[in-house]
């Protein structure tokens, strides 16, 4: 999520405190000139992660602090899909498999359960992917399929998509 | 109605038993297995033929061939129930062509000829003014083709998916229930007669794939072959994978799926909620059809078995009798 606000003296500090109060996690604070020709006013953009359902409480707290929020850009990982992988998951670099999905930026692996029955026999893993859009989920699954083909893994997809 | 039966195995004998047990007004005037045949215009003694077969003998006389029965016997409908050949459909394909050219209706449970040559056979039947029916080729006793062609005529089918292979469903059910390995569950299926000595055709999804090709080509106006089916079997599945699915109230089943608009035909193991209507036990088959007018329909029933498959063949025979065959 991105919050944009006017950079008036004291506003930034006033904004940061409520974010941590509602359990948010600040990823970046970016100062940017609003328009090239503009005066001395700066915009501040705060990129943060927020647990589900805390946004309205945060906005309330920000208002109480006198911070004016110009724009909210919300991105939610709305879509979830759980798949099962079978094969030599460790020998074929499981973290690389996960990275290839995370690298998309718009889909990420949020859960992984791995069962390794015995050395040299294939292991099985359940992998949960979350993404912002259905398209991104399809893309992530396509990536996983092609990685599986390269690494000779079996991917079991759900009957119903994301 | 007079019929000739090619093939006197599980399905052929199931048909004979049903004819003997019920008053279906069907007379069998020709019969053949792989090495013998009988032609008798007055009607073959099925009881005697069954007992010859049960004693390990041929069903008829060694100097009558299946081709003789097709060409010379006096019948209204040829019932072709010999083994499926997915490579060229022979010799069944030649026998079916022969009967259609003679102006005889054909009913078959044999997937090979229908999957490989449906457009040609359909046109040949039309030219000769006879019926070609094949309900038993897909999901045994479930009248899926009839339901889609007649009952759902006028609907657009957007997607069709289900459990098309009882052997795989049995193996996966056992792996999920008792944590058996694939090899253990397969051995058990073999012992119970649910799996062949060479299970490749079932466990690699070929059987399910052919059924999808039949539905695509005969009901959904597609032109497909087995090569068009994206196919993954169940041989690599682990008990751990089933347990990981189980942890989320899901299981794994081999699902065949057709999405006509996207041109997708696919057979693969899929994760599916245990509460889903397609999660059927043992050797059952189950198919969901998504339509525009009727909504979603799910069919569940026995996909194989002697008398169960005979039921589909007899349904086709009586359909033809009620519409075409005069006298008997
Ligand atoms: N069984 C089922 O539940 C089921 C369900 C749906 C569809 N089907 C299909 O129905 C067909 C028959 O299945 P089935 O289970 O009855 O098979 P089966 O038990 O193996 O019986 C096949 C019969 O065909 C005979 N045969 C083999 N080659 C022949 C030839 N060239 N000419 C004439 N007869 C020949 C065999 O002769 P011998 O007796 O001399 O060996 C046997 O009597 C197959 O295409 C199968 O895919 C079966």
Image (tube, rainbow, N blue to C red):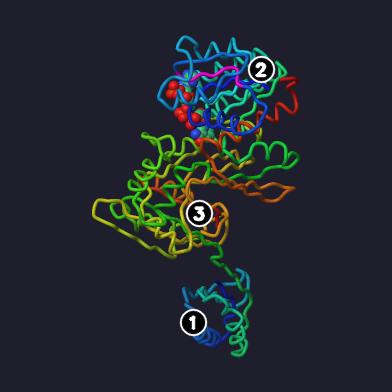
The circle drawn on residue B28 is none
Q: Find disc 3 in the rendering and name its residue.
A: A158
Q: Secondary structure at mark 3?
A: strand
Q: Find disc 2 in the rendering and name its residue.
A: B104
Q: CA distance from mark 3 to mark 1?
A: 33 Å
Secondary structure mostly seen in the magenta stretch: strand
Q: Secondary structure at mark 2?
A: loop
Identified at 57% across, 75% down, the residue is A3
Q: Chain of mark 3?
A: A
Horizontal placement of B238 versus B116: left or right? left
Residue B222 in percent (x, y) is at 63, 32
Q: Is residue B87 visible?
A: no
Identified at 35% across, 61% down, the residue is A114
Query: In the rendered structure, are the residues bearing label 3 and label 1 in contact, judged by CB atoms less than 8 Å apart?
Result: no
Q: Is residue B300 visible?
A: yes
Residue B253 in percent (x, y) is at 48, 50
Q: Is residue A31 above or below residue B246?
A: below
Asked whether mark 1 and ligand 1 are closer than 8 Å, the reply comes as no
Give the quarter of the image for residue A55: bottom right
Q: Secondary structure at mark 1?
A: loop
Q: Residues within 10 Å of mark 1 (few under 14, many from 20)?
A: few
Query: In the rendered structure, are the residues bearing label 2 and label 3 in contact, judged by CB atoms less than 8 Å apart?
Result: no
Q: Find disc 1 in the rendering and name its residue.
A: A23
Of residues A149 and A122, which is closer to you in this image? A122
Horizontal placement of B101 versus B265: left or right? right
Residue B131 in percent (x, y) is at 68, 24
* Segment colored magenta: B28-34
């Amino acid at each position: 999520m991105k919050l944009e606000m006017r950079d008036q003296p004291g506003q930034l500090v006033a904004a940061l405190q409520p974010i941590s109060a509602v359990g948010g996690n600040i990823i970046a604070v970016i100062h940017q000139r609003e328009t090239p020709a503009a005066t001395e006013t700066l915009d501040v953009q705060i990129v943060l992660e927020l647990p589900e359902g805390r946004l309205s409480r945060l906005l309330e707290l920000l208002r109480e602090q006198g911070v004016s929020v110009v724009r909210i850009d919300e991105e939610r990982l709305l879509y979830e899909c759980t798949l099962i992988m079978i094969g030599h998951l460790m020998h074929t670099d499981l973290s690389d498999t996960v990275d290839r999905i995370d690298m998309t930026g718009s889909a990420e692996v949020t859960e992984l359960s791995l069962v390794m029955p015995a050395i040299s026999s294939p292991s099985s893993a359940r992998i949960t992917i979350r993404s912002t859009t259905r398209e991104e989920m399809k893309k992530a699954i396509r990536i996983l399929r092609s990685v599986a083909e390269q690494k000779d893994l079996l991917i079991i997809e759900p009957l119903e998509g994301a | 109605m007079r019929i000739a039966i090619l093939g006197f195995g599980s399905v052929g004998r199931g048909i004979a038993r049903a004819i003997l047990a019920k008053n279906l007004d069907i007379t069998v005037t020709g019969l053949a297995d792989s090495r013998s045949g009988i032609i008798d215009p007055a009607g073959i003694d099925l009881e005697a033929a069954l007992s010859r077969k049960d004693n390990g003998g041929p069903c008829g006389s060694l100097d009558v061939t299946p081709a003789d029965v097709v060409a010379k016997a006096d019948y209204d409908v040829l019932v072709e129930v010999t083994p499926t050949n997915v490579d060229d459909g022979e010799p069944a394909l030649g026998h079916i062509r022969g009967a259609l050219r003679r102006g005889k209706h054909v009913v078959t449970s044999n997937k090979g000829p229908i999957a490989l040559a449906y457009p040609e056979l359909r046109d040949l039947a039309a030219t000769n003014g006879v019926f070609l029916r094949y309900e038993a080729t897909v999901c045994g006793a479930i009248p899926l083709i009839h339901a889609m062609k007649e009952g759902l005529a006028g609907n657009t089918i957007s997607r069709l998916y289900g459990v098309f292979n009882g052997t795989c469903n049995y193996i996966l059910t056992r792996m999920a229930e008792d944590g058996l390995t694939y090899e253990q569950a397969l051995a058990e299926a073999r012992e119970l007669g649910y799996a062949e000595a060479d299970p490749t055709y079932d466990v690699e999804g070929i059987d399910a794939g052919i059924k999808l090709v039949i539905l695509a080509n005969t009901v959904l106006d597609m032109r497909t072959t087995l090569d068009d089916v994206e196919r993954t079997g169940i041989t690599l599945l682990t008990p751990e994978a089933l347990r990981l699915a189980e942890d989320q109230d899901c299981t794994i089943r081999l699902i065949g799926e057709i999405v006509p608009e996207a041109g997708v035909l696919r057979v693969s193991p899929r994760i599916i909620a245990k509460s889903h209507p397609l999660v059927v036990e043992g050797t059952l088959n189950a198919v969901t059809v998504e339509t525009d007018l009727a909504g979603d329909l799910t069919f569940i029933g026995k996909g194989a078995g002697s008398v169960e498959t005979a039921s589909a063949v007899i349904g086709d025979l009586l359909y033809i009798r009620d519409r075409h065959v005069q006298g008997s």
